[in-house]
Amino acid sequence: MKMRLDRWLATLSLGSRSEVREWIRGGKAAVNGRIIRDPALSFETEEDRPALNGREIDGRVMRHVMMHKPGGLLTAARDAKQPTVMDLLPPVYRSIGCMPVGRLDKDTTGLLILTCDGELNHRLLSPGRHVTKRYRVLVEGELTETAVDAFAAGIDLGDFTAKPAELRLLGPSLAETVITEGKFHQVKRMFAAVGNEVTALHRCAFGPLELDPELREGEWRELTEEEVRLLREAAGMDQGAFR
Ligand code: URA
Protein backbone atom coordinates (compact mmCIF):
# COMPACT_ATOMS: atom_id res chain seq x y z
CA MET A 1 0.00 0.00 0.00
CA LYS A 2 1.39 3.43 -0.94
CA MET A 3 1.47 5.96 1.91
CA ARG A 4 3.01 9.37 2.59
CA LEU A 5 5.98 9.10 4.92
CA ASP A 6 4.46 11.32 7.64
CA ARG A 7 1.19 9.38 7.66
CA TRP A 8 3.06 6.08 7.55
CA LEU A 9 5.22 6.83 10.61
CA ALA A 10 2.22 8.24 12.50
CA THR A 11 0.15 5.14 11.61
CA LEU A 12 2.94 3.04 13.09
CA SER A 13 2.33 4.92 16.40
CA LEU A 14 5.78 6.48 16.37
CA GLY A 15 4.45 9.95 17.10
CA SER A 16 1.73 12.39 16.14
CA ARG A 17 1.53 13.55 12.53
CA SER A 18 3.08 16.93 13.43
CA GLU A 19 5.84 15.32 15.51
CA VAL A 20 6.86 12.93 12.76
CA ARG A 21 6.76 15.75 10.20
CA GLU A 22 9.22 17.69 12.32
CA TRP A 23 11.50 14.67 12.70
CA ILE A 24 11.42 14.05 8.95
CA ARG A 25 12.28 17.67 8.17
CA GLY A 26 15.07 17.46 10.74
CA GLY A 27 16.68 14.53 8.88
CA LYS A 28 15.82 11.88 11.47
CA ALA A 29 13.89 9.58 9.12
CA ALA A 30 15.28 7.29 6.46
CA VAL A 31 13.76 4.83 4.01
CA ASN A 32 15.79 2.01 2.50
CA GLY A 33 18.90 3.55 4.00
CA ARG A 34 18.40 7.06 2.54
CA ILE A 35 17.52 10.11 4.64
CA ILE A 36 14.17 11.51 3.49
CA ARG A 37 13.33 15.11 4.39
CA ASP A 38 10.07 15.43 2.49
CA PRO A 39 7.10 14.26 4.63
CA ALA A 40 4.88 14.07 1.54
CA LEU A 41 6.96 11.48 -0.31
CA SER A 42 5.09 8.18 -0.68
CA PHE A 43 6.43 4.67 -0.09
CA GLU A 44 5.27 1.07 -0.27
CA THR A 45 4.40 0.16 3.30
CA GLU A 46 4.85 -3.59 2.86
CA GLU A 47 8.16 -3.39 1.01
CA ASP A 48 10.10 -0.25 1.83
CA ARG A 49 12.11 -0.17 5.06
CA PRO A 50 11.71 2.89 7.27
CA ALA A 51 14.05 3.94 10.05
CA LEU A 52 13.92 6.61 12.69
CA ASN A 53 17.02 7.95 14.44
CA GLY A 54 19.04 5.24 12.76
CA ARG A 55 16.83 2.40 14.02
CA GLU A 56 14.98 0.22 11.52
CA ILE A 57 11.26 -0.09 12.10
CA ASP A 58 8.86 -2.81 11.00
CA GLY A 59 6.85 -0.74 8.52
CA ARG A 60 4.17 -3.25 7.56
CA VAL A 61 0.64 -1.98 8.05
CA MET A 62 -1.01 -5.17 6.75
CA ARG A 63 -0.54 -7.88 9.36
CA HIS A 64 -2.48 -11.01 10.23
CA VAL A 65 -2.29 -12.72 13.60
CA MET A 66 -3.10 -16.13 15.06
CA MET A 67 -3.75 -15.92 18.78
CA HIS A 68 -4.39 -18.57 21.40
CA LYS A 69 -7.08 -16.64 23.24
CA PRO A 70 -7.01 -17.19 26.97
CA GLY A 71 -10.12 -17.17 29.12
CA GLY A 72 -11.01 -13.88 30.83
CA LEU A 73 -10.47 -11.48 27.94
CA LEU A 74 -13.14 -9.86 25.80
CA THR A 75 -12.93 -10.29 22.05
CA ALA A 76 -13.26 -6.65 21.05
CA ALA A 77 -11.14 -3.93 19.51
CA ARG A 78 -11.49 -1.95 22.75
CA ASP A 79 -13.60 -1.78 25.88
CA ALA A 80 -13.99 1.02 28.38
CA LYS A 81 -13.87 -1.26 31.43
CA GLN A 82 -12.47 -4.68 30.69
CA PRO A 83 -9.25 -5.97 29.15
CA THR A 84 -9.50 -7.23 25.59
CA VAL A 85 -7.51 -9.53 23.35
CA MET A 86 -5.91 -6.42 21.84
CA ASP A 87 -4.06 -5.92 25.13
CA LEU A 88 -1.96 -9.00 24.31
CA LEU A 89 -0.53 -7.34 21.19
CA PRO A 90 1.93 -4.44 20.95
CA PRO A 91 0.04 -1.11 20.55
CA VAL A 92 1.07 -0.79 16.90
CA TYR A 93 -1.37 -3.58 15.98
CA ARG A 94 -4.24 -1.43 17.18
CA SER A 95 -3.03 1.66 15.33
CA ILE A 96 -2.70 -0.21 12.04
CA GLY A 97 -6.28 -1.44 12.46
CA CYS A 98 -5.75 -5.10 13.31
CA MET A 99 -9.15 -6.44 14.43
CA PRO A 100 -10.47 -9.78 15.67
CA VAL A 101 -12.30 -11.89 13.09
CA GLY A 102 -15.57 -12.58 14.87
CA ARG A 103 -15.93 -13.12 18.59
CA LEU A 104 -15.18 -15.74 21.15
CA ASP A 105 -16.97 -15.45 24.50
CA LYS A 106 -14.95 -14.13 27.41
CA ASP A 107 -14.57 -17.62 28.89
CA THR A 108 -13.87 -19.35 25.55
CA THR A 109 -10.27 -20.23 24.73
CA GLY A 110 -8.52 -21.15 21.51
CA LEU A 111 -7.94 -19.96 17.99
CA LEU A 112 -8.64 -16.32 17.23
CA ILE A 113 -7.57 -14.71 13.98
CA LEU A 114 -6.94 -10.96 13.84
CA THR A 115 -6.33 -9.04 10.66
CA CYS A 116 -5.86 -5.54 9.28
CA ASP A 117 -7.62 -6.60 6.10
CA GLY A 118 -11.21 -5.42 6.51
CA GLU A 119 -12.45 -7.18 3.41
CA LEU A 120 -10.93 -10.51 4.46
CA ASN A 121 -12.44 -10.09 7.93
CA HIS A 122 -15.86 -9.30 6.54
CA ARG A 123 -15.86 -12.15 4.04
CA LEU A 124 -14.72 -14.76 6.55
CA LEU A 125 -17.74 -13.90 8.70
CA SER A 126 -20.23 -13.65 5.87
CA PRO A 127 -23.08 -16.15 6.48
CA GLY A 128 -23.06 -17.15 2.82
CA ARG A 129 -19.45 -18.38 2.99
CA HIS A 130 -20.06 -21.16 5.56
CA VAL A 131 -16.52 -20.96 6.89
CA THR A 132 -16.21 -23.82 9.39
CA LYS A 133 -15.29 -23.45 13.05
CA ARG A 134 -14.31 -26.49 15.09
CA TYR A 135 -14.74 -26.47 18.85
CA ARG A 136 -13.78 -28.88 21.60
CA VAL A 137 -16.49 -28.89 24.22
CA LEU A 138 -16.75 -30.14 27.78
CA VAL A 139 -20.27 -30.42 29.12
CA GLU A 140 -22.20 -31.28 32.22
CA GLY A 141 -23.86 -34.68 32.12
CA GLU A 142 -23.39 -37.39 29.54
CA LEU A 143 -23.59 -36.88 25.83
CA THR A 144 -25.62 -39.37 23.83
CA GLU A 145 -26.17 -40.36 20.22
CA THR A 146 -29.44 -38.41 20.47
CA ALA A 147 -27.36 -35.24 20.67
CA VAL A 148 -25.36 -36.34 17.62
CA ASP A 149 -28.59 -36.84 15.68
CA ALA A 150 -30.03 -33.52 16.86
CA PHE A 151 -26.88 -31.66 15.77
CA ALA A 152 -26.96 -33.44 12.40
CA ALA A 153 -30.60 -32.47 11.88
CA GLY A 154 -30.17 -28.80 12.84
CA ILE A 155 -31.40 -27.44 16.16
CA ASP A 156 -34.29 -25.05 16.63
CA LEU A 157 -33.04 -22.41 19.07
CA GLY A 158 -36.21 -20.33 19.09
CA ASP A 159 -34.99 -17.19 17.35
CA PHE A 160 -33.24 -19.23 14.63
CA THR A 161 -32.55 -22.81 13.60
CA ALA A 162 -28.91 -23.76 13.74
CA LYS A 163 -27.74 -25.40 10.53
CA PRO A 164 -26.87 -29.11 10.63
CA ALA A 165 -23.57 -29.55 12.46
CA GLU A 166 -21.15 -32.39 13.00
CA LEU A 167 -20.86 -33.68 16.57
CA ARG A 168 -18.18 -36.23 17.42
CA LEU A 169 -18.27 -37.79 20.87
CA LEU A 170 -14.80 -38.14 22.39
CA GLY A 171 -15.78 -39.16 25.90
CA PRO A 172 -18.85 -39.20 28.16
CA SER A 173 -18.79 -35.39 28.52
CA LEU A 174 -16.31 -34.40 25.83
CA ALA A 175 -17.00 -33.75 22.16
CA GLU A 176 -15.94 -31.87 19.08
CA THR A 177 -18.38 -29.99 16.94
CA VAL A 178 -18.01 -28.25 13.61
CA ILE A 179 -20.38 -25.39 12.83
CA THR A 180 -20.59 -23.16 9.79
CA GLU A 181 -22.29 -20.20 11.46
CA GLY A 182 -21.23 -17.86 14.22
CA LYS A 183 -24.29 -16.62 16.04
CA PHE A 184 -24.08 -15.26 19.58
CA HIS A 185 -23.38 -18.09 22.07
CA GLN A 186 -24.26 -20.54 19.33
CA VAL A 187 -22.35 -23.59 20.53
CA LYS A 188 -23.39 -23.13 24.15
CA ARG A 189 -27.01 -22.74 23.08
CA MET A 190 -26.91 -25.83 20.87
CA PHE A 191 -25.60 -27.98 23.71
CA ALA A 192 -28.07 -26.46 26.17
CA ALA A 193 -30.85 -27.39 23.74
CA VAL A 194 -29.88 -31.07 23.97
CA GLY A 195 -29.67 -30.90 27.76
CA ASN A 196 -25.93 -30.44 28.30
CA GLU A 197 -24.61 -27.16 29.69
CA VAL A 198 -21.19 -26.26 28.35
CA THR A 199 -18.54 -26.01 31.06
CA ALA A 200 -15.53 -25.35 28.81
CA LEU A 201 -15.30 -24.29 25.18
CA HIS A 202 -12.16 -24.20 23.08
CA ARG A 203 -11.86 -23.35 19.38
CA CYS A 204 -9.41 -25.69 17.64
CA ALA A 205 -9.83 -24.55 14.05
CA PHE A 206 -11.19 -21.72 11.97
CA GLY A 207 -11.73 -22.50 8.29
CA PRO A 208 -8.51 -23.99 6.95
CA LEU A 209 -6.40 -23.00 9.97
CA GLU A 210 -5.70 -25.11 13.07
CA LEU A 211 -4.52 -23.52 16.29
CA ASP A 212 -0.72 -23.79 16.33
CA PRO A 213 0.08 -26.27 19.15
CA GLU A 214 3.24 -24.26 19.92
CA LEU A 215 1.11 -21.33 21.08
CA ARG A 216 0.21 -21.43 24.73
CA GLU A 217 -2.79 -19.51 26.09
CA GLY A 218 -2.21 -15.78 25.63
CA GLU A 219 0.49 -16.28 22.99
CA TRP A 220 0.26 -15.21 19.38
CA ARG A 221 2.23 -15.10 16.16
CA GLU A 222 1.79 -13.69 12.70
CA LEU A 223 0.24 -15.89 10.05
CA THR A 224 2.56 -17.38 7.47
CA GLU A 225 2.15 -16.48 3.80
CA GLU A 226 0.62 -19.90 3.21
CA GLU A 227 -1.89 -19.42 6.02
CA VAL A 228 -2.92 -16.05 4.60
CA ARG A 229 -3.30 -17.67 1.20
CA LEU A 230 -5.53 -20.39 2.66
CA LEU A 231 -7.67 -17.84 4.51
CA ARG A 232 -8.07 -15.70 1.40
CA GLU A 233 -9.07 -18.82 -0.51
CA ALA A 234 -11.68 -19.69 2.15
CA ALA A 235 -12.93 -16.10 1.87
CA GLY A 236 -13.25 -16.41 -1.91
CA MET A 237 -10.68 -13.69 -2.55
CA ASP A 238 -8.22 -13.64 -5.40
CA GLN A 239 -4.72 -14.39 -4.27
CA GLY A 240 -2.91 -11.38 -5.72
CA ALA A 241 0.28 -10.48 -3.94
CA PHE A 242 0.84 -11.44 -0.32
CA ARG A 243 -0.38 -8.55 1.80
N1 URA B 1 -20.17 -20.43 20.51
C1 URA B 1 -20.30 -20.02 21.79
O1 URA B 1 -21.30 -20.30 22.44
N2 URA B 1 -19.31 -19.29 22.33
C2 URA B 1 -18.17 -18.99 21.68
O2 URA B 1 -17.29 -18.34 22.24
C3 URA B 1 -18.03 -19.42 20.36
C4 URA B 1 -19.05 -20.13 19.79
Image (cartoon, rainbow, N blue to C red):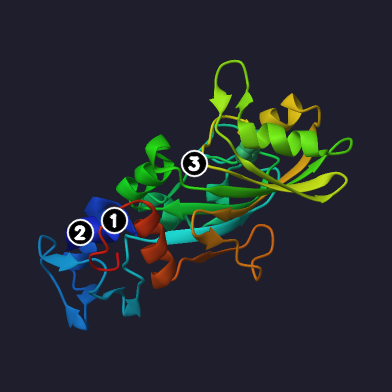
Which amino acid type is marked by label 2? Asp
Q: Which of the marked residues, 3 or 2, is nearer the chain's N terminus? A: 2
Tell me if 31 is positioned left or right of 183 in this view.
left
> Which quadrant holds residue 160?
top right
> Which quadrant holds residue 88?
bottom right
Which amino acid type is marked by label 3? Gly
Q: CA distance from mark 1 to mark 3?
A: 27 Å
State the image coordinates of residue 86 (x, y, percent, origin top left). Answer: 52, 49
Looking at the image, which is closer to me, 87 or 217? Answer: 217
Task: Label 3: state its secondary structure.
Answer: loop
- Looking at the image, the residue that sits furthest to the top is 158
Taking the spot 10% from the left edge, 60% from the top edge, the residue there is 40
Q: Is mark 2 within 8 Å of ligand 1?
A: no
Task: Tell whether label 2 touches label 1 (CB within 8 Å).
Answer: yes
Q: Where is ligand 1, by quadrant?
A: top right
Provide the residue designation for mark 2: 6
Looking at the image, which is closer to me, 79 or 185? Answer: 185
State the image coordinates of residue 153 (x, y, percent, origin top left). Answer: 62, 32
**Total numbered badges shown on the rendered structure:** 3
Q: Is residue 42 above or below residue 190?
A: below
Looking at the image, which is closer to me, 161 or 32? Answer: 161
Q: Is residue 242 above or below residue 98?
A: below
Task: Label 1: state its secondary structure.
Answer: helix
- Note whether residue 241 is visible: yes
